[in-house]
Amino acid sequence: MKDTRRKLNFYSLFDFPKIEKSLEKMALEGWMITDATGNLWKYERIEPKKLKFNVVFLPKVSALDPEPTEQSANLAEYASKTGWKLAVSAAMMQIFYNENENATPMETDPIVQVDSIHKTVKKNLLWSWIVLMAVSLLNVFIRFAGVTDNLINFITDSTQLILVLSWLVISIESLFHILSYYIWYKKAKNAAENGEFIKPRSNMIAYYSILVILLVISLYLMFRMFSTSDSRIFWLVMGYMAVIFAVVYGVIRLMKKAKIPGKYTLIAVYAIGVIVSFIIMGGIIHLVLSNDYVDEKAAGTYEHNGRLIEYYLDEIPLRVEDMENIDYENYSTRNEIESTIFAAKSEIRQRGRIGDRVPDLEYTIIDVKMPFLFDPIFNDIWNDRDETHDEHVPDGHKSIYEEIDAASWKADRAYQLVSQEFGGIDHYILCYGNRIVEMVFYDFSPDEADKALAGEKLIGYVMK
Amino acid sequence: MPRVKFKTLTEQMFYILLCLKNECYGMDILDKVPAMTNGRVTVGSGTLYNLLEQFLDVEMIRETKVEGRRRSYILTQKGMDMLREEYDRITAQAKDFRTVFESEE
């Protein structure tokens, strides 16, 4: 029979009445709390008994102070006088128990109690909620700002969308904490004036629902990162996070053991965290940029001016060779597919090796899944190149899309970029139902037969 | 309207300060207050500890002796003034009470 057990604590520091109740229930079942740091609390076996638990907050104590703190020991001395024994000192939260059910409670003045809770929450939780909310809102804002720059990339990138969603969830969660705390504080402060103590109550169902959502999002992101990008990057990022966590946790433990005051530990944790972060991130960036690093998805490499260049042999629906009579075996064909509930995008590049003068082909196929997004996406592509309203380019030098014969391309609508100086450019926008294709021909121009063939292939292409 | 800190004192604050008119171990206040009030007022050890810390911070009391974990305190002039203000407030209330009820008789 095991004499110790660990159990997840589901309650926030601020929700101490639920903590007290849960500890009383554990004692009745024969388990006494012995460690309340982190979320996985430790219990030791005792004779099952009815005990009364009280949580007292020490606002001046920091989570980084070495245990037991001077304040904790002093409070325990006072408490012993009324039969209260210290079960656990977990930084600012001191947990006491008493065998006498009718013992004078540890806290008897609601004004003092509300004040201690407020100071503790302000020092340890409130600022972290506010910072978290500010950071998450800033992230949502930055990511949404990206929509105006490149709508297509934004709505076809599931990682981007899921990140926006997760930051939004985090900001809502922080706001929820701040609001629910302040609603309680206002009520409790007023009630304390009349000698009444209103117990704080946090909505843990909402809190844990949010945590579960965030966990699912994180797992999805990890899975996506693992499956779509280079697996070495995935492991490097995972390793980076593990090292940072281990270093920070290790430093805190060491400094606490060495009885170094919390404020110095805080400075050391920030300094070491930042330094180690820079070193590891620098290392990762150096590795990725170095000549030895080859994309895992590449089919192979060739050397050009002493540098390794990757090439790809992805399947693509339309090739230069389908339209041009060319005998060239060194084409790199890249097809990057992204898909979300809003749209799917296939970004296709067929390029010859650097230095080889051969025709190249670039086209992006976008399948719009939600009709209301068709026009914004079309306009996004259009405005990327069309200089009609660009005041920086003088009239007579602009490039402007002009509608051309769509039937040649077997399309519903077709547009060609036309330079006011040099005439038609081999840059097209083609519409096939809900599919939009932007196509650029380098060093060759499609004739009527090429356009018809391209149309057929583009219509028949299934994005997988 | 919420009170300004220590502008008015709760009953427990009042009796803790009263106990510290003469130098006294902090811990002994836990026994002194119920004795002084015939058990009408009791002070919890958490409340006492946090209040002593707060009174020290605003210099209403000062530490006089430290013997291991046993610390003694005594009221400062500032603490004395606040206690007096509270006494005046309470006696004014009592006087008003008497005025109202005695005039009815």
Image (cartoon, rainbow, N blue to C red):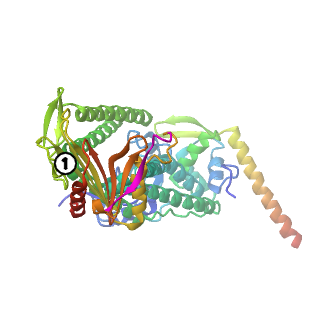
Which residues make up the magenta segment? A394-406
Give the left or right position of residue A76, taking residue A303 as reference. Answer: right
Say few, some or many: other residues with alpha carbon within 10 Å of mark 1 (under 14 / 14 to 19 / 20 or more).
many
Give the left or right position of residue A437, taking residue A264 as reference: left
Q: Which residue is mark 1?
A: A320
In magenta stretch: residue A397: yes
Q: Quadrant of residue A24?
A: bottom left
On the image, the x and y values in percent for residue B76 come to 67, 38
Residue A197 screen position, x and y as percent? 56, 63
Q: Quadrant of residue A55?
A: bottom left
Instruction: Tell which of A207 and A232 is nearer to you.
Output: A232
Toward the viewer: A160 or A25? A160
Query: Where residue A97 appears, x then y in whole percent?
Result: 40, 57
Please give left or right for residue A84 compared with residue A212 in the image. right
Q: Position of residue A36 (x, y in %)?
A: 35, 52
Local secondary structure at mark 1: helix
Seen at 56% across and 56% down, the residue is: A114
In the rendered image, residue A366 lying in the magenta stretch gets the answer no
Residue A85 visible in the shown view: no
